[in-house]
Image (cartoon, helix red, strand yellow):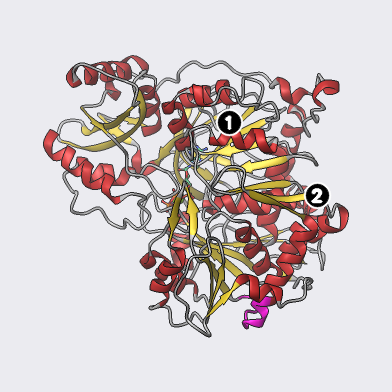
Amino acid sequence: MAEYREVPIYDIPLRLQGKDDKVHKRPKPHIDAATYKSNYQASITKVDEFWGKLGRETIDWDVPFKTVRHGDFEKGDVAWFPEGQLNASYNCVDRWAYKCPDKTAIIWEADEPGQGKEITYKELLSEVSQVANALLDMGIRKGDAVIVYLPMIPEAAIALLACARIGAVHSVVFAGFSADSLRDRTVDCDARVVITTDEGKRGGRTIATKSIVDAALKECPKVEHCLVVKRTGSNVEWQEGRDKWWHEAAAAQRPYCPPVPVSSEDPLFILYTSGSTGKPKGVVHTTAGYLLGTALTVKHIFDVHEDDRFACMADVGWITGHSYIVYGPLMNGITTLIFESTPVYPTASRYWEVVARHKITQFYTAPTSIRLLRRLGEEHVQGHDLSSLRIIGTVGEPINPEAWDWYNENVGKKECAVVDTYWQTETGAHMIAPFPGATKTKPGAATVPFWGVELALLDPTSGQVLEGNEVEGVLAVKQPWPSMARTIKGDHQRFLDVYMKPYPGYYFTGDGAARDKDGYIWIKGRVDDVCNVSGHRIGTAEIESALIQHPGVSESAVVGVPDEVTGQSICAYVALKPSFSYDSEDALVKELVLQVRRNIGPFAAPKMILIVNDLPKTRSGKIMRRILRKIASNEADQLGDLSSLADPSVVEKLKGDWLKKA
Ligand code: ATP
Ligand code: MG
């Protein structure tokens, strides 16, 4: 096992301690270290008692549950709170519309700075009700699927809640996907209604959402209606009978719609994974367990209090948007932000303007954005009032300690809790993350498991449990937890094959991880990406973290390629900061190799380093290493499913670069 960079253990950040209550009125963290520990033990050993209590406290039930948990991984028949009935929209909206009607539920920050609006809980209840009634009018009933192909406008949240209100199952397709990808997902879900906009706005550009939908629907015979939000007002093609304007359909409806109680185990939504490793999977989440997981993680991992203003910068097209823009924050009755633009529009200060303008208390983004902003320089962060922030979070990929430090110093000013949250589309909510106020952090470590998440590190070949600390293996989970996915749409066997079969009795995450001497978990990247050089297993994340410590490097991606002598050898793709200049590429490559040798050891040294402009990423911003592996293995003709690739031209360029070098 490779050695870790020695890192300081940060103490509980100042802004959380509430010491200077009089000045800042900072709320006190919900829990301390001892409570975390005792709760954690209870959550995995006294499952009925622990989760029964939290289930009753966190959710308002129409019909109370009797059983807390049923089923196991092997059959994939996991059910939580099975006799219970509830409504997600009631829990996210009505409760607060009655208790604090004038509180802002949604802040919308539109593409152009300063534009946008705020929606109170009272208004949200009316709007959700009207759209729910409009869907009922279109014949949508409990269990029917609705496709949501919307950019980041308040209607995205409203659409999800309107579906949930009548028991319909939403399936959001990120509004950047092509017509073909949209068609495949629409057909896969059997959707009868698609919700979209005339056009979308993002980073000053216009996205022709309606015409993409029109193209997709040519081959979706089951879709009867298309509900269109007017965003730009441009002329769009219109199919009479099928297409309806959102504002007209809603205005015709009564602004109250009784929420339809559904079973705890009725599906709330279907969502396709990002597709980093292959063909996206239509993951199905059910209602009660998912709501409980998102509500509790927002409360505890983001240390949320009543008056907080929460900004998750993900897109609602990904699980992060579902759990941490819509359901988790609204389950807690706080204010959530919907951000239509990009981190660099109109300037690289956009995020920080948003934080200052809306007095954001929690800020949540992905390593890809952090690395991008680090690359552009800290001057863009300076001069913005970020003093409202208490918690800054990251999700999506392993965060390199270097990027973590940058985030902590420049954004958190070393006074915020940095929460690196490890989880997946399939897990619904955070699995491993620090509890601010309770968990000391280490840059680059996801730290400790959330309640109910009983982790195991397994030997990848034998499947044996690796006990104790200072071990590394594949990351698995030992018992069902409330917010886990229940199946893959239309293919339960694939669900079992992918997650339950590889290590019987466990849920298999597909990720490699290590437990350090203090019992902290470090995510090492995908198991498929782990390189094996002369018998040494090395996670890609580790080598990438070594490379990014070089002052010129903005981002890197490491893959293992077949090697006759060593089994595999390491190939690194490295992107440089625009401000960095160098004389000779050969000398730079030597420096980079040295950097890895020094940091990790000679066995980890890349055999090949390719300096590139850009790395291929999913539309959610994750590096697609499988593409890089194929290119480096001279198999660029077998790249597989590329539907989730954000920019195909990057791959073409890389293929060319590779041919020149190899
Ligand atoms: P697909 O399953 O289709 O290949 P995907 O795995 O990228 O796509 P997601 O569910 O969006 O789809 O991503 C989950 C994965 O992201 C995790 O399995 C892990 O590899 C990575 N990940 C998420 N958060 C973290 C984190 N904080 N640290 C390290 N890795 C993370
Ligand atoms: Mg995955």
Residue picked out by circle 1:
447
Q: At numbered mark 1, what does the secondary structure look like: helix, strand or loop?
A: loop
Residue picked out by circle 2:
103
Q: Which of the numbered marks, if any, corresponds to residue 627?
A: none
| Quadrant of the rendered image containing residue 2 | top left
Q: Please name whichever residue, 40 or 662, is drawn nearer the observer in this view of the structure.
A: 662
What is the span of residues highlighted in magenta in the rendered image?
A: 134-143
N-terminal of the two: label 2 or label 1?
A: 2
Residue 461 visible somewhere in the drawing: no
Q: Which quadrant is home to the C terminus?
A: top left
Residue 656, given in percent of the width and then of the height, sits at 16, 42
Residue type at the position of mark 2: Lys
Q: Is residue 461 above or below residue 177?
A: above
Is 135 inside the magenta-drawn segment? yes
* 440 to the left or right of 371: right
Determine the residue positioned at 53% across, 85% down: 241
Residue type at the position of mark 1: Thr
Residue 278, given in percent of the width and then of the height, sits at 36, 54
